[in-house]
Image (cartoon, rainbow, N blue to C red):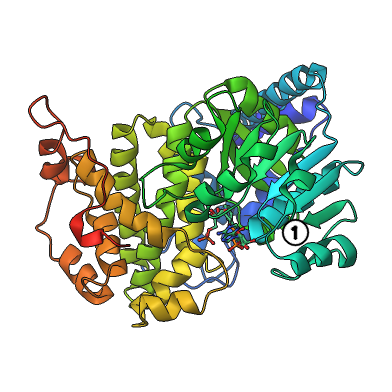
Amino acid sequence: MATSQRFVGRSGRGGFVGVGGRSPAVERRARRVAPPSAPTTPGGSATFQTKPNPAGSLRNETRSRRAARPCALRSDEDYRRAVRASWRRLILWRARRSAAQDEQEQVVVEKVAVCGGGAFGTALATVLARKYGEAAVTVLVRDAEVARSISEDHVNPRVGWTLPGNVRGTTSPADALEGCDLIVWAIPVQASTSFVEKVKDHVPPRVPVVSVSKGLEVTSCRTMHEVLERALGEDQPLVALSGPSFAKEVMEGLPTNLVAASEDERHARFVQQVFASPTLRVNVTRDVMGVEIGGALKNVVAIAAGIVDGLGLGNNALSALVAQGTAEIRWLAVRMGAEASTITGIAGVGDIMLTSFVNLSRNRTVGVRLGKGESLDEILSSMTQVAEGVKTAQVVIALAKKYNLVLPVLTAVAQVVDGQIDAKEAVDTVMTFPQIDDVDRGYDFYKEGEPTAASPSSSCEPSNELSGV
Ligand SMILES: NC(=O)C1=CN([C@@H]2O[C@H](COP(=O)(O)OP(=O)(O)OC[C@H]3O[C@@H](n4cnc5c(N)ncnc54)[C@H](O)[C@@H]3O)[C@@H](O)[C@H]2O)C=CC1
Ligand SMILES: O=C(CO)COP(=O)(O)O
């Protein structure tokens, strides 16, 4: 009775009245859920009758759906109205925000320098060259043949991707950097200090440098922000751009969401405007530390995830390990001044999931191969691209010491990477930990380790065991 009243109301507004007052959509859904040929179950609900009884099965189906609904949405129409209203709020919000954004001044980009012609530098050069068809996008590389191929053949031979005509290659820092409006930094972390020293005299002051490199410098424990600031000075606008973004998918124009972080929000907003496109969303934050630590340490967790898969331990173990690793990243990041919400957000959990669960990841691949018994030397010597997590794992130990933390999963990876234990032993050790309370409360040494006035620790030197790495 209630059902037909609901749909009479709709039909009064030019809607419809289906069988028994139900809409065609409800009919279709009900038929899908209750196929006439479905087998009988003991105590048989109408949904699983052997003999078709469409009217009865629909009644029961509606009843059971209604019973499963939240109490405030008792009827079908309440429910639909709530869904429509929720969606409408989103659409209105989009319209308001888009109007505000349309009023913003459009950024003008005429010359972009991309330092590093690896996979990600090439992908971002392509994204910007496609968006700014009139702009000159110059990729600064070390190898003259790579530069020639990019300029003349429009192919980067390192990755084999075809590039837009307005992307050029060069080995000259002056050619790439002078007069540019934006610099994208896609040099691997461990090579960044020496490379920035070589090019810094050509970096125009006040031009934003957007670092996309993910890792921590092993000799100093510095983040990329710290590495670049030290070389370029505090006045150089710096932005960390990170998030779940495989170069290949960015190159293919697949939807991607990044986070631009800068202590000066204006620089992050500038980068948001520069990169934003229908397939590239760029969020903005001032939490540089959170974005950089999330991006750096997800590579270490991805190695752990790969190890679990390489050992064939299954999806349950994989997910638990990634969740534990995520908590450890959060513990460390918060101690370093980051916001916990950055680690649970797109540049944290978003990237952790991508890199830990998807085979395109180089760091995950390193872990899989370690888990299968290959040595790290064998793995690294066969790779043509960087897996930043290997070096960053070593920095984690020094940071954990500095911030008085014990990080089970991250430490296990450091041990394996350093060759002190093998992958199987690391996993066995973690699995035989005593049963504990859930994550934050469980590892009581986490709380015990909180720095106190009596136990400040400022050293960030890699420990003796790791010296010489
Ligand atoms: N590939 C990806 O999907 C993503 C990579 N990233 C990050 O971007 C950074 C670069 O990664 P990829 O482009 O993928 O690496 P890649 O291994 O494909 O290329 C690295 C580039 O750096 C150059 N390079 C290596 N050593 C150098 C040195 N000593 N001096 C100057 N240049 C040197 C190489 O010649 C190459 O052009 C890494 O920190 C990575 O974590 C970030 C997001 C996605
Ligand atoms: O950072 C990445 C995706 O966001 C790429 O990860 P890998 O370096 O492990 O391939």
Q: Is residue 15 above or below residue 97?
A: below
Q: Quadrant of residue 82?
A: top right
Who's the residue at 65% across and 38% down the image? 201
Q: Position of residue 381 (x, y in %)?
A: 48, 78
Q: Nearer the viewer, residue 446 or 84?
A: 446
**Does residue 212 appear in this view?**
no
Q: Is residue 30 above or below residue 21?
A: below
Q: Position of residue 428 (x, y in %)?
A: 18, 71
Q: Position of residue 436 (x, y in %)?
A: 12, 51
Figure quadrant of the N terminus: top right
Q: Amino acid at mark 1?
A: Glu
Q: Nearer the viewer, residue 247 or 46?
A: 247
**Does residue 168 appear in this view?**
yes
Mark 1 residue crowding within 10 angstroms, few (<14) / some (14–19) / many (20+): few
Q: Secondary structure at mark 1?
A: loop
Q: Position of residue 466 (x, y in %)?
A: 25, 60
Q: Is residue 275 above or below residue 31?
A: above
Side of 210 relative to 370 (left or right): right
The response on whether ligand 1 sits within 8 Å of label 1 is no
Q: How many marks?
A: 1
Side of 202 relative to 228 (left or right): right
Q: Quadrant of residue 333?
A: top left
Side of 305 relative to 382 (left or right): left
Of the four image quadrants, the one with ligand 1 is: bottom right
Q: Quadrant of residue 181?
A: top right
Q: Which residue is mark 1?
A: 252
Q: Nearer the viewer, residue 302 or 179?
A: 179
Q: Nearer the viewer, residue 173 or 307?
A: 173
Figure quadrant of the C terminus: bottom left
